[in-house]
Image (cartoon, rainbow, N blue to C red):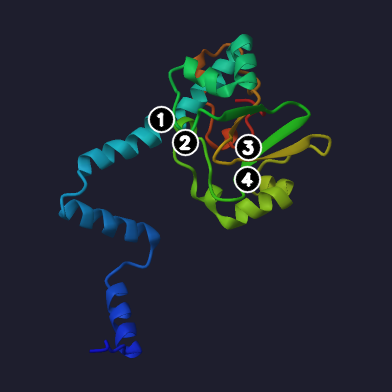
Amino acid sequence: MKPSYDSDKVADIHRHLHSHLPPEPALRVKALESLLVEKGLVDPAALDAWIDAYTEEIGPKRGAAVVARSWVDAEFRARLLADAGAAVAEMGFAGQASGHLKAVENTDTVHNLVVCTLCSCYPFAILGMAPAWYKANEYRARAVRDPRGVLAEFGVNPAPDVAVTVWDSTAELRYMVVPQRPSGTDGMDEAALAALVTRNAMIGTDDLKGGV
């Protein structure tokens, strides 16, 4: 017997199923999480621990510690700029997304900005979870086409004589920005310096050189 197909009926079923899902993406994720927990496929405690690790421990605190070390140790900074993967491994931060890592340094003449135009490649082992705007189509397109305009929207305005260099991350090569050390921090130790480093500064959409 040939199966029948009623498009109106199928559309009605589709609407019925989607009527039970919340409209906002965050709520959809929460609904999915609840379903997985209910079926015993996910341990909520393990999930919370994983989220806490990536937001609080793995990053961006790891990246901040790397930057702070580069500010106080010129030899480490040189190794970081020459081979970032090896340098972060020295600090015990090696990970899947840091093995092919390149560090680029902001200077008085260059400001660096990182993007991934194809998808959202990102060194999460060092910087933690990527911000939503980093994955947005608008940022991915405009960061290359109008980097100064994008930076201005983040409150970063490099002087006209400062070159803005855009680095396009891929699955094989990911980037982190080493921001300039803020003025007025000469007496700070590594821990205090690391507390000044933001995730956005390591992407290039924050500027720390103005001082504390």
What number is the disc on residue 109?
none
Q: Position of residue 79 (x, y in %)?
A: 61, 15
Crowding at mark 1 (Cα within 10 Å: few <14, some 14-19, many 20+):
many
Q: Position of residue 63 (x, y in %)?
A: 50, 27
Is 26 drawn above or below residue 189 in the view shown?
below
Q: CA distance from mark 4 to mark 2?
A: 21 Å
* Circle 4: residue type: Phe
Front: mark 3 or 2: 2
Residue occupied by mark 2: 124
The reply to whether the C-beta atoms of the residues labelled 3 and 4 are less than 8 Å apart is no
Q: CA distance from mark 3 to mark 4?
A: 10 Å
Q: CA distance from mark 2 to mark 1?
A: 8 Å
- Whichever of labels 4 and 2 marks the residue nearer the N terminus, that label is 2
Q: Position of residue 172 (x, y in %)?
A: 56, 37
Element on which disc 4 rests: loop
What number is the disc on residue 58?
1
What number is the disc on residue 154?
4
Q: Is residue 158 visible?
A: no
Crowding at mark 4 (Cα within 10 Å: few <14, some 14-19, many 20+):
some
Crowding at mark 2 (Cα within 10 Å: few <14, some 14-19, many 20+):
many
- Whichever of labels 1 and 4 marks the residue nearer the N terminus, that label is 1
Residue occupied by mark 3: 204
Q: Quadrant of the C terminus?
A: top right
Element on which disc 1 rests: loop
Front: mark 4 or 2: 2
* Residue plotted at (73% across, 52% down): 145
